[in-house]
Image (cartoon, helix red, strand yellow):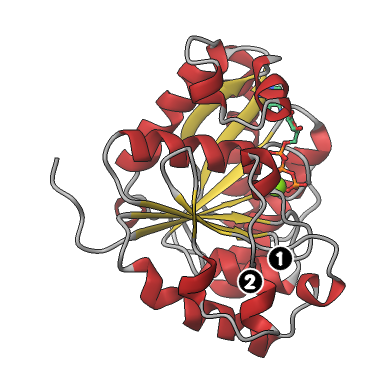
Amino acid sequence: MTLLTRPIVTAIASGKGGVGKTVIAANLAAWLAEQGYRVLVVDCDLGLANMDILLGITPAHTLKDVVFGDKTIHEIITPTDAGFDLIPACSGVKEMGQLIYEKVQLVKDTLEPVFSQYDQVLLDTGAGISEVVLQFNLFAQKNIIVLNREPTSLTDAYAVIKVMSQRFGRRTFAIVVNSARDEKEANRLFTHINTVCKEFLGLSVDYLGYIVHDDAVPRSIMRRSVLIHDAPDSRATKRCAAVARAVVDWDPSTCYGPAVSPGQSRSGHVAV
Ligand SMILES: Nc1ncnc2c1ncn2[C@@H]1O[C@H](COP(=O)(O)OP(=O)(O)OP(=O)(O)O)[C@@H](O)[C@H]1O
Ligand SMILES: [Mg+2]
């Protein structure tokens, strides 16, 4: 396999919390590492980080020690058993969750030189549309939005896409449906959000597939192991691998939807 010369930076976001961003980021990263990519995951959920817990590691230092302490970014890079490197964040530190714009820029400037050592960088962002979250989403070339079958997750996913497109001019997003009952349900949810985005924002979203609801997922978290290693034959693992392949193949530069100027865009509440 030819290793890439420029890292691909992919942000994994959602409107609603708890829809599976961190699980998906960890498993995508583990799958990519298995394929031979050099992979870095950045825990961008600055105030409520939990990628380290999911992986069963206790990092000595986190981004907090870079922003408010004297650590360099290189000193906090933590190798994981899952085959990728992690830049950990901390949990329960309010100042980190509410970083001012300048500090977020500092984090981004500090991260950028590190990225060139990797082929794939995944940003596990916090939920919602806070300034910090939006800044990390803008940092990525590929924007993945995760939603599940809860109607609120669909409306909140739409809210993220709306803000990113109307405020920052982003036009390409890809959807992953998590915790779906089956393919049919996932397709229905994707069609719904795509229809709403076309109607109200004038853009089409892409589809990277779905991951089924599977008890193997919480079991793997309890065992502090990534799902694809903990339960390689599970239904969710097979779907994670399919989504990971789609993420690699997805080229946002070829999928621009019809342009709509902010004045033309109709804002609207999404009925689900
Ligand atoms: N496909 C799935 N099947 C069953 N349970 C799942 C699945 N995906 C995620 N979960 C469960 O959902 C919970 C939340 O997952 P996760 O922490 O990845 O969400 P998140 O979007 O990162 O949350 P937050 O917004 O708080 O960062 C986990 O505890 C996990 O057990
Ligand atoms: Mg998370």
Q: For mark 1, does the 10 Å Cα neighbourhood hold few (<14), some (14 to 19), or many (20 or more) residues?
A: many
Q: Which one is nearer the viewer's eye here, 146 or 41?
A: 41
Please say whether residue 16 is visible from this viewpoint: yes
Please say whether residue 264 is visible from this viewpoint: no
| Label 2: which secondary element | helix
The residue shown at (49%, 23%) is 229
What's the mark number on residue 46? 1
Mark 1 residue type: Leu
Q: Which one is nearer the viewer's eye here, 248 or 1?
A: 1
Residue 144 rendering spot, x and y as whole percentages: 53, 48
In which image quadrant can residue 63 be found? bottom right
Residue 24 rendering spot, x and y as whole percentages: 57, 37
* Spatial CA span between label 2 and label 1: 8 Å
Q: Is residue 159 above or below residue 224?
A: below
Residue 76 rendering spot, x and y as whole percentages: 54, 68
Q: For mark 2, does the 10 Å Cα neighbourhood hold few (<14), some (14 to 19), or many (20 or more) residues?
A: many
The residue shown at (50%, 75%) is 73
What's the mark number on residue 229? none
Mark 2 or 1, which is nearer the eye? 2
Q: How many marks?
A: 2
Residue 81 rendering spot, x and y as whole percentages: 48, 39
Q: Is residue 44 above or below residue 19?
A: below
Q: Read off the residue under disc 2.
A: 63
The residue shown at (30%, 39%) is 249
Q: Is residue 104 above or below residue 125?
A: below
Report if the beta carbon of the residue with label 1 is closer than 8 angstroms to ligand 1.
no
Q: Quadrant of ligand 1?
A: top right
Mark 2 residue type: Leu
Q: Are marks 2 and 1 in contact (CB under 8 Å)?
A: yes
Label 2 or label 1, whichever comes before in sequence order:
1
The residue shown at (66%, 20%) is 180
- The quarter of the image holding the C terminus is top right
